[in-house]
Amino acid sequence: MHVDLTLRALPIADVASAAREAQALGFSGVGVTESTGNPFVAATLAADATADVRVSTGIALALPRTPMDLAYTAWDLQALSGGRFALGLGSQVRAHVERRYGAAFARPAARMREQTLALRAIFDAWEHGGELAFQGEFWSHTLMPPNFRPPALPDGVRRPPVLLAAVRERMLEVVGEVADGLLGHAFQTVDVLREVTLPALERGLETGGRARADVEVTAAIFVALDDGEWEGVRRRVAFYGSTPGYRHVLDHHDLGGLFEALHAASRAGEWRTMPDLVDDDVLRLFAVRADTPAEAAAEIRARVGGLADRVALVGEQPDLAQWAAIAAALRDG
């Protein structure tokens, strides 16, 4: 099982050294996020600093960018990395897309589907030299003169895969229909993965006439190896649990009342007291708590073995050497 490490909100000057460390510790991939800066700058630094690991955006915001902008950037990163780049995209939520980025958010699943199809059409034109003739509802790309076609990728290097983050069923169906991979969210229980996520993905695969092997599934999992990390995860779960977009996960476990309490506390600005509302039984639904890396790996495998192709470890200020031991146990076990 491949195990990825996400570099979250690092100062841009630290990205290259962090990526090199992740590679040296044996992680399969390095992800960069879009939170306090441009993820493609971070991905460029990570790709240039490494030689073996996959480098991905996890995630870059899709809707504020055009398919052509994303295509040029991903193509360059795939060339720079020698075929190790994966374009991870997500829709984010309405407030950030509209109010922070000033972009359109309406019908996000339909937009993400079309954006992925447009990327496929652009990559086809660049790979095979054909005309570009994509006409969609939200974007149209019908001009690609020779002088504006990027150089061919190096021999043996394929177009970058497009991975989509998805939480709700409609977006999961889009992943199954058109994307190369699913980036799962850490605020997801095993029951939700089995009973909601994967069935929705299968519906999308059926619509697209594809098989499960056509889509790589990454499961993100909260991990804690000591009490400090456990309390850090509790804060993260309280934050996500207060967000309306994730309510369905709590509802699936008859925890709608917890959402109501967390949401009310967040609206009142009571961020410091919110973790107190998440007891250990609830936290264990989302997080692996173990005393040793071997125990953590065994629990992760028990949860998502046979369901996911990759795992992304999520936590608060982890001991990377300990996490590398988890990765080694998952890879070799």
Image: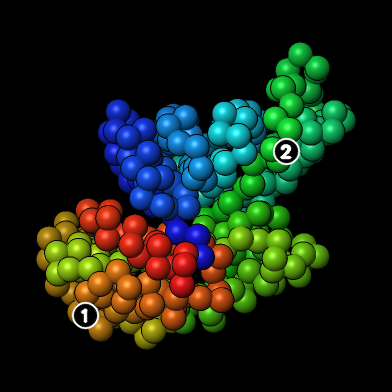
Badge 2 marks a residue whose secondary structure is: loop
Q: Which mark is residue 156?
A: 2
Q: Residue 22 at x, y = what percent? A: 37, 46
Q: Is residue 6 above or below residue 204?
A: above
Three-letter residue code for mark 1: Asp
Q: In the displayed structure, would residue 86 be above or below residue 70?
A: below
| Contact between labelled residues 2 and 1, with CB atoms less than 8 Å apart | no
Report if residue 94 is visible in the image. no
Classify residue 280 by image quadrant.
Answer: bottom left
Q: Position of residue 235 (x, y in %)?
A: 21, 63
Residue 252 x %, y %: 43, 81
Q: Residues within 10 Å of mark 1 (few under 14, many from 20)?
A: few
**Mark 2 belongs to which amino acid?**
Gly
Along the polypeptide, which appears first: circle 1 or circle 2? 2
The answer to whether any part of residue 47 appears in the image is yes
- Quarter where residue 221 is shown: bottom left
Q: Is residue 295 left or right of residue 139?
A: left
**On the image, numbered disc 1 is attached to which residue?**
280
Q: Is 236 left, or right, of 96 in this rendering?
A: left
Query: Camera-side residue: 125 or 156?
Result: 156
Helix, strand or loop at disc 1? helix
Q: Which is more toward the observer, 177 or 299?
A: 299
322 or 160: nearer the viewer: 322
Q: Residue at x 80, y 17 (%)?
A: 146
Residue at image coords 51%, 42%: 52
